[in-house]
Amino acid sequence: MTQPFRIATAGRLGHADPVRFSFDGRILMGLSGDTLASALIANGIHLVGRSFKYHRPRGIVSAGAEEPNALVGIHRDAARRTPNVRATVQEVYEGLEAVSQNRWPSLAFDVGALNDVASPFFSAGFYYKTFMWPKAAWERLYEPFIRRAAGLGVAPDRPDPDLYANRFAHCDVLVIGGGAAGLAAALAAAETGAQVILADEQAQTGGALRYETGAVIDGQAGWDWAQTVTADLAARDNVRLLTRTTGFGYYAQNMVGLVERLTDHLAAPDPARPRERLWQVRAKRAVLATGAIERHMVFPGNDRPGIMLASAARTYLNHFGVAVGRNIAVYAADDGAWLAALDLHRAGVGVAAIVDARADVAGPHVEEAKRLGVACLPAHAVTGTTGRLRVSSIRVSPVAGGAARDIACDALLTSAGWTPAVHLFSQSRGKLVFEAETQRFLPGSNAQDVACAGACAGASGLAETVEQGLEAGARAGGATGGRTVAVREARGESWTGGMLGPADNGTGAKAFVDFQNDVTAKDIRQAVREGMRSIEHVKRFTTTGMATDQGKTSNMHGLAIAAAMLGKPIPEVGLTTFRAPYTPVTFGALAGHSRGALFEPVRRTPIHSWAEENGAEFEDVGQWKRAWYFPRNGEELHAAVARECRTVRASAGIFDASTLGKIEVVGPDAARFMELMYTNPWTKLGVGRCRYGVMLREDGFIYDDGVVGRLAEDRFHVTTTTGGAPRVLNHMEDYLQTEFPDLRVFLTSTSEQWAVIAVQGPRSRDIIAPLVERIDLSDEAMPHMSVREGSICGVPTRLFRMSFTGERGFEINVPADFGRAVWEAVWAEGRKHDACAYGTEAMHVLRAEKGFIIVGQETDGTVTPHDAGLGWAIGRNKADFVGMRGLRRADLVAPGRKQLVGLKTKDPDVVLDEGAQIVADPNQPVPMTMLGHVTSSYWSENCGRSIALALVAGGHDRMGETLHVPMPGGAIAVEVTSTVFFDEKGERANG
Amino acid sequence: MLLIHCPYCQEERPELEFRHAGEAHIARPTDMAALSDADFERFFFIRSNPKGIVFERWRHIHGCARFFNAARDTVSDRFLATYRAGDPKPALDGEGA
Amino acid sequence: MRRYSVFAIAREAMRGHRGWPEQWASPEPKKRYDVIIVGAGGHGLGTAYYLAKEHGITNVAVLEKGWLGGGNTGRNTTIIRSNYLYDESAGIYDHAVRLWDGLSQDLNYNVMYSPRGVMMLAHNVHDVQVFKRHIHANRLNGVDNEWLTPEEAKAYCPPLNISRNARYPVMGAALQRRGGTARHDAVAWGYARAASARGVDIIQNCEVTGINRGPDGAVTGVETTRGTIGAAKVGVVAAGHSSVLMQMAGVQVPLESYPLQALVSEPVKPVFPCVVMSNTVHAYISQSDKGELVIGAGTDQYTSYSQTGGLHIIQHTLDAIVEMFPMFTRMKMLRSWGGIVDVTPDRSPILAKTPVKGLYVNCGWGTGGFKATPSSAHVFAHTIARDEPHRINAPFTLERFRGGRLIDEAAAAAVAH
C-alpha cells in the first residue's frame, strides 16, 4: 500500500512512522503527523463528501479549520462516533476509521444527487414558496422528506463514555494564535515577566509558516524560527502553551473561551483522561493573532473535487509532503497562488497554467513562472470545469471576452485573496472598519483591552506581522518603553491582490459562494432581487454562511455580490454578526463534569443512610433526596403509606424532618424584625413558646411558612419549607441589610447544622422520655407549641413540642453529626411501642387529614393568607409587615377569590386526581367555567375514605355545596367541606 | 460571565459568586399603610429598565453576603462603579446616561 | 402580489429565477399614516397585515430601526404551544395555534408550521401535580394536552434518558400534540410580503427617536431618524426596547429586559422528532428541518440590552441537555446568540391601550412571544382599529398590576414559557 502522491523529498513528516487508517472501509496508509486530509490526498483521494442540498461530489478545499467540504464521521467505537469532523483538522492515528456522510448508497454513487439535476427548481428560498398544497401534506409528506434529505452526519446514538474537563485561568496576557505574530507577541509579553497563555489550534505552532517557503526570521527559515521560539516559551515558568486549542468565544470583561482537544489524535487514549478541556480565561489583556483565511475564486463549476485553496496545496506539499495532483492549474487574483504553483513545479508536479483574473500581474513570481515555461494567463477567467468525481479540465476565457480554451488538469488551486480573521475581535465588541483599497474589514476601535497583530490586523507581509506581534506583546505585558525583544530580520512573502465576488458577471452554471450549503452567486443575486437588502436577510434567505464553517471562506464573496447588485458600497450593506463559537465546540466540553451525579449536587440528610439501609424509596425535593415511604414486604406506595398513616395515629411514627430550612434570628431587635417579616405578632410570644408563622412577599401573596420557637428574648429558631430555605434567608437578609439596617439582628442559616427527628403519635412522649434529659416532658411543663433546650442521648437538643400530623408530637433538633445516632436510639425505643418510620408521602396525608397546607402545593404564588384560611395568622394591630399593603389591593380583597376548602367525593372510594379542575355544571360545553382545582388528594386510611383539599372560587361560602370534577371518564360529584377531616376539635395534639 | 468588584470585599470576583437583586434606589416607603394603589404599583412593579446606565443591586451571596449597588451600562454590560448599600448614587463623570 | 406555487417555481426555473418580484416594497416614508407600528418583528408586521386585511386600514407604516425580523423573531427557538394554565393565557395562545394551522395558506408563504408535538418533562412529584393541573384545565378549555408515562415519553422521543438513575429521573410528561415549531424568518417575511401587498409601507433602517403628542395629550406621530411621521394611532411592538419607546411618551411600564441566549448544533440526520422542554433541569430542544438541534438557554440574571450573555448560561443549558440526552456530548455547538426579552412581573404580556390617547402597546412576552405571533398580531390590530381590546386580549391590560389581577403563569405553573 503505497502513497502515490507522497513526495519523499518534501514536507516535514518522518517516513519511518507509517499509520494505517480506513476511509469508507478502504484500508489506507498515512504518516504520523498527517491530518486525515493530507493522508487521503497522499493516496490520491480528493472526493470525501457530498454537499448539503444538491449532494454534489466534494473534495478537500483547505488545510485548516475553515474547511467547508471535507466533513466526515470518525468512528472510534460504537459509543464514540463523531459526525461532521473536518478531515483537514483531524490527525490520523493507527486504526482511525473515517466514513463519508450525506450519501446513499455510496460516496461515488449517491441517489441524492438527483437534487442536483433538479436544482433549477431548488433556488434560494424555494421551500417558502411551495409545499403548501394540500395543507396536510406539509406535515405528513414534504417535511419528513426534506428532513431526511437535510442534515449531514449521523448523531451518536449511545451515551458518550468520554470525560470532559473544565478549567478557569487568569493571566496577564492571553495570545490567541501561534503563527508568526502570536509567537512574537507571546515572546515579547513573556519577556516583561507577565503571566502569558498562548493558544494555537494546530498540533504545532507556526501558523502560515507551515507552508511559506520564502520566510526567513533571524536567519532561520520561518518554520524553524517558530519551533525555536516555541521551545523557548515552553521552557519559561510564566508561559502556558496550549496547542490543539481554539479560542472560540470572546465574552464580556476579557473572558475568552478556549477548547483544548486532548485525545482525538491518539490511537489509544487513556479513558481516564478527558477528551477535551474547556478553558475560561480571564485575561488582563489579550492579543489576537488569528491570521487570515484564504478565499476561493467564484466561478462556474468551482466545487469539483481537486479544486482547492492555493495555500492548502502549499501546506500539503511543504508541510505534509503530499502533491495535490500530477498536473495542476491555478486560478487566482492573488500573488500567493503563483508561489504555490512554483513550489509544486519545483517538486516535480506539472503546472498546466496559471490563470489570473488581474490584468497587471508582475513580480519575481511571474518572472519565475515564465522562466519555467508555465503558461501564464493574466486577465483570464475560468468559466467552467469538467470531471464528475474529480476535476479533469478547466475552461479559460479572457475576462474581456474572446475565445475560450480548455486546459486539462487534475487539480486547480484558487485564491481570491485573504480575509482577516476578525471573528474574536468582533465578538469582543470591537468595531470593524472597511478598508476600501484592499476590500477588507479590519479591527478598528476597541471595546475591551485587546490588541490585534499580524494578518488579522491587516499586516501585509511577514516583517510587519512580526513587528506587530512584538509590539502588541510588549504593550500587553506592560512594557512602557516599547519593545522587549527584537528580531534582526524577517522577510517573507507579501500578500497582495485579491478580489471579492466572481471575476465575470457570468450567469452560467453554478458558481459557488458557500460550498457546504450550495449557495451560488446566482442565489445571492436572486435574494437581492426579491427584496433582501440587508446582508442578514440575504444570509438567512440563501443560507450562505450558515453552514458548519460559518462562511469563513465565503462571507466576503456573498457580501460583495449583494453589494454589487444593490449598487451600494460594501460597508453600507453591512456585515453579518460574528457569533461564537469560532469553530464548533462539543456539548461535552461545555458541560464538562456536570454530568450524572455531578449535574447538580445531591443533598442528603444525616439520617439518609439509615433510610437507605431500611429500604426507603426516595423522592427529589429540590436538591434533596427525601425518604418517600418505607415499604415492607414488597408493599406498593399506597399500601406502605396506609400502614404508616395508621401506625402514626395508633401509636407513633418517626420522621426525618432534617431538610426543613432553619434560620437563627438573634439580636436585641429580633422580635421587631420578626414582626416585619411575618404576618404574625411576635413581641408577646413567650420564651419557650412556638408559633406558626406566615411570610408574605410585598405583594401580599404567601411566600413561605413554618413554626418559629422563641428560645430567649433575643433569639428565635425559625423554620422554613424545605425548598424555601435559601430564598427565605435571602429575603430576610435583603430587608435587614437594605430596608431596616438599623435593626440589631443577626441571621444565620442553621439548616444543615441541625438534624431533625419528628416523633409523632400518641406514644411519642413515651418513646422519647427515656432518652431526654433536663427537660420536663409533662403537658403542664411542656404544652403543645413549646420549645425546650436540654439533651437527648447525652447530646444537646432543642426539643420542640409541635405537630404537623395533629397528634401529640415532638421534633428533636440535634447537631447534625449526632443525627443518625440519636435517630437509632429513638428508633430502638419506638420499636418497643410498635412505632414505624414514615416518609414524606405519609407526612403529606397526615397533614392533609388535618387541613394543614403545604406552601407550593396549596399555594402557588397567587394565594393570600385569607384565601388559605390563615387570616387568623395576621396580626391585627401591626403597623407594618412585608405584604401588608399588597394585601389590601382591590383584587386581593375582591369577592369570589379562590379559597381553600375540603372536598369529599360522594363515592368515598374515589380518590380525585391532584390538579383536577372543579366546575359547578359538569354538562356545560367546552370551554367550561372552572371554579378551581384540587391541590391535594389522598386515600385516608384513618378516615376510611378519600379526602381532598382544593382552591375554589368563593369556597368559604360554599360549605355543603355539591360541585363536580369532570374527568375523561365522566364527572365526579364532590361535597365542599371544612379542610379538617380528622379530629376536628384538635384534641389529639394536646392529648 | 461578568467580573464584579465587591465594595465590601474590595476585590473583583466572578459573577457566579453574586446574585442580581433588581433596580437600586427604590426605598420601601416608611408609611406603607398610607400608600395609594398607584404609589404601591410604582414602588413594587414599575422599573426604569434603562438602555444605558442602570443603578442596580447585587448581593455577594457566595462571598461576604452583603447587598451593594452598582452602576452599569446595559448596552455594553460594563460596570462604571460599585458602592455600598445606602450610599448615594455616585457621580459618573463623562459617562452620561 | 404574485402567488407562490410549484408552478410559479417551475416557470421561474425556466428563466433562471430572474423574474421573481420583490417580496416587499421598500418605500420612502410618507408624511402621514393612519397607523404607525413601531417594530417590524413578527408581531408588528402581523399587526399591519391584519389591520389591512380585517379592518381595511391600509395606510399603515411599520417602522424598524434595523432589518425586519431581526429582533427576537429571528432569534428565538420557535416553540409553539398553547397548554397554558389560566383561561386568559389559554385563550390567546390557543387562538394562535388555530391561526398557525393555515397561516401558510393565508399568507401564501410556507412558514413551515410543524405540529410535531411539545413534550414537557416532569422530574418530581411537584412537577407531576403542576402538569396534571395544566392538563385538566386545558381539557376543559378545549386545549389538547395529555399525560405520558416515562415509557410513553421515551417512545415519543427515543433519545430521552428515562433511567431511574438520572439525577432527576423523568416521572412523566405532558404532551401537546398540536404544539411544534415554525420557521421564524418565514413568519416575518410572509407577513411582510402579505402586508406590503395590501399597501402597508415597511420602512427599515428607520429608528423612532420620539413620540409626538398634541396639546390634548393624544399621539400625533413619531420622530424618526428619517424625519417626522404623523399618525393618530401608534402601536409599539418593540419587545426588549418597549420600555425605551414607552418612556418617549411618558408612559412607565412594568418591564425589565434580560438577555436570553439560544444555540444550534451542527446539522445531523433526523434524530429528534419533537420538542422537549424541561423546566426542572432547564432545557428546551428540538431539531430544525435543516438538521440542527435548536436549544434554548435561560436568561442571564441582570437586565441588559447587549444581545449577548454569559458563557456559563450556555454551559448550564448544555449540562441539562446532555443529562437528558447523554448521547449528545459529541454533538457540537455551531452558533450561539442572544436576544433581549422584555419580562413583566407576572410573565404575561401587556396587549392594551395606554393612558395616552392613540398609543397602544404590545409587549412583555418574555421568553415566549414567538408562539403567540399570529394571535397577538390579530387581536392587537383589533385593539388599534376599534380603539378597544378584543375579547381575547382584554385581560392583558397595563393596569392589572395596580389592582393585583395578575395572570401569573410563572407563579402558578413554575414552568418557563
Image (cartoon, helix red, strand yellow):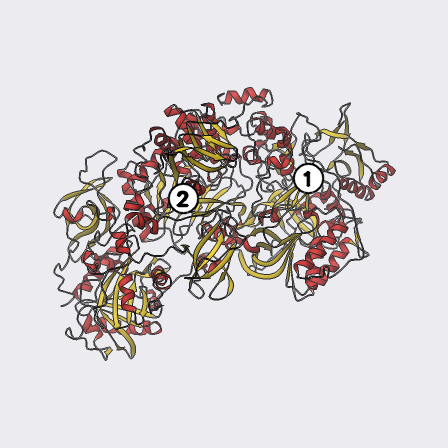
Labels 1 and 2 share a subunit:
no
Relative depth, front residue between A543 and A307: A543
Q: How crowded is mark 1: few (under 14 residues within 10 Å), some or many (20 or more)?
A: many
Location of residue C291 with respect to A808 vertically, above or below: above
In the figure, is residue A131 to the left or right of A206? left
Quadrant in the picture for residue A259: bottom right
Q: Which of marks 1 and 2 is in front?
A: 2
In the rendered structure, which amino acid carries the disc numbered 1? Arg
In the figure, is residue A704 to the left or right of A230? left
Residue C89 horizontal/vertical position (percent): 32, 40
Residue at numbered disc 1? A295
Q: Residue C366 carries which label?
A: 2
Relative depth, front residue between C285 and A788: A788
Q: How crowded is mark 2: few (under 14 residues within 10 Å), some or many (20 or more)?
A: many
Element at badge 2?
loop
Quadrant in the picture for residue C33: top left
In the rendered structure, which amino acid carries the disc numbered 2? Gly
Relative depth, front residue between A278 and A334: A334
Relative depth, front residue between A779 and C52: C52
* Chain letter for mark 2: C
